[in-house]
Amino acid sequence: MIIIFYLFLQISHNIYFANLHSHTEFSDGQGLPEAAYLYARDSAQIDVLAITDHTHYLTENSYQYIKSIANRYTEDGRFIALTGQEFGSLNQFGHITIFEAPNLCPVPASDLNATYRWLNQNKLVTQFNHPREGDFNYLSYDYTGDKYCSTIEVVNGSGNYTILNEQMYFLALENGWHLSPVANQDNHRKKWGDATTSAGKIPLTGILAESLTKEAIIAAILNRRTYAMEVKPKSDRIRLKDFSIDNRIMGEIYPTYNLTILIRLEVVAETGFAKIYLYKNGLIYDSVNTQNRDSIVWYKTDSTSNAYYFVKGIQLDGDQFWSAPIWVEKAPRRDQLVISPNPLKTSSKIIISLSEPKPWPTLTIYNISGEKVYDTSTYAHPMIISSQFSLEWRGIDQTGKNLPNGIYLIGIKFDSGEIFKGKIAIER
């Protein structure tokens, strides 16, 4: 039996805590941008704050001023101040946040398709805010919008209201969007970073990024490496250390030839977990036996199919979290040439796996100088049509004599003209 291992190197990511939707007195909120960034950094002690004042309140000068303040308070490794703008109209298609745009969005707030085109043309990372039923054309899939609209609010609110948008998240995924969930405070009365909802919970977004820099944070948001959480008490931040499939982390689109996949989950918090569910294609597929523990490590294997997976957890005190999905795409089987053992001691098997059945091929072997030393073209081939062939070679030439140690080149040719090439070493 020959086992082929596919090795994927997983890049290390850190967890950073963010509030990606907030306002100041530059639109319909309170306080100055300077106060917002300072409060988020020093009082709320989060890693990232995005000020997202409404586009229609801003002038180009006031927007550029907020950007300058954000640059002043950004300190790599300590705190990232993002500039956004909340664009759109609740009477039209809804609200989105556009992150780090060089200028205010010039598109009419009534034209969703033009907005998608402008975002795509300018490569601007975007978030769906507090989606309601009917917003964004009922979250109908849009190929142009899908590239840069990368996150959607599952929790939004602070003060006297709470908006839970779990079903809108599920609907967007079902419609084909590639999105990750976020939870934001939509601050209008200060307390940027630790404002609570009407239920007394702090909405926060977890971001998996390689480092605490503006570039790394924006890249993480674009690549859907976010998860949404409710926090109560303030210190009980949920750390989703790992949700991966075959080492591909959440947010990724994962094409694979493997027949099975390995799902891994690791999550910790101060308060134990009552329930954790694994969703597959929008439906509960499995659950984790949490035993009310505050630290969970869980594995599951599944047959490969075209599917997306995410997890949702509920703590003992009712706080919830939602992961980003991982989209698994079952790739067509690829043609493979496997030589084992290699180097050859006494004999080796040369195995060809094909995506479709074909007649028996011809094997030719050359020495390193390009001279033919072995050829099966004169042999009578079995009349077999198959998708896998196994040919045994004992390191001999055409006359049956042992060949000297060294490197040899393998060529396998099918009647269709398809050629496989490989190398084998002889070490007796």
Image (cartoon, grey):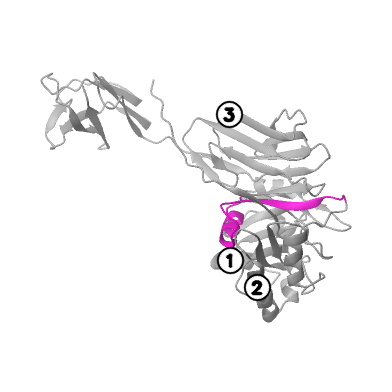
The magenta stretch spans which residues? 199-225
Identify the residue under disc 1.
117
Amino acid type at image mark 2: Lys
Q: Out of 86 and 232, give the one closest to the viewer.
A: 232
Q: Quadrant of residue 239?
A: top right
Q: Residue at x 81, y 62 (%)?
A: 191
Counting the numbered discs, the total is 3
Q: Residue at x 82, y 70 (%)?
A: 30
Left or right: 25 with respect to 84? right
Amino acid type at image mark 1: Arg
Callouts 3 and 2 close, C-beta under 8 Å: no
Identify the residue under disc 2.
67
Q: Is residue 2 magenta?
A: no
Q: Position of residue 317 (x, y in %)?
A: 84, 39
Nearest to N terminus: mark 3 or mark 2: 2
**Circle 2: element type:** helix
Q: Out of 10 and 58, give the one closest to the viewer.
A: 10
- The answer to whether residue 308 shows anywhere in this view is no
Amino acid type at image mark 3: Thr
Identify the residue under disc 3.
301
Q: Residue at x 10, y 20 (%)?
A: 399
Q: Out of 245 and 390, give the one closest to the viewer.
A: 245
Seen in the picture, residue 181 relative to 62 is either above or below; the reply is above
Q: Quadrant of residue 53?
A: bottom right
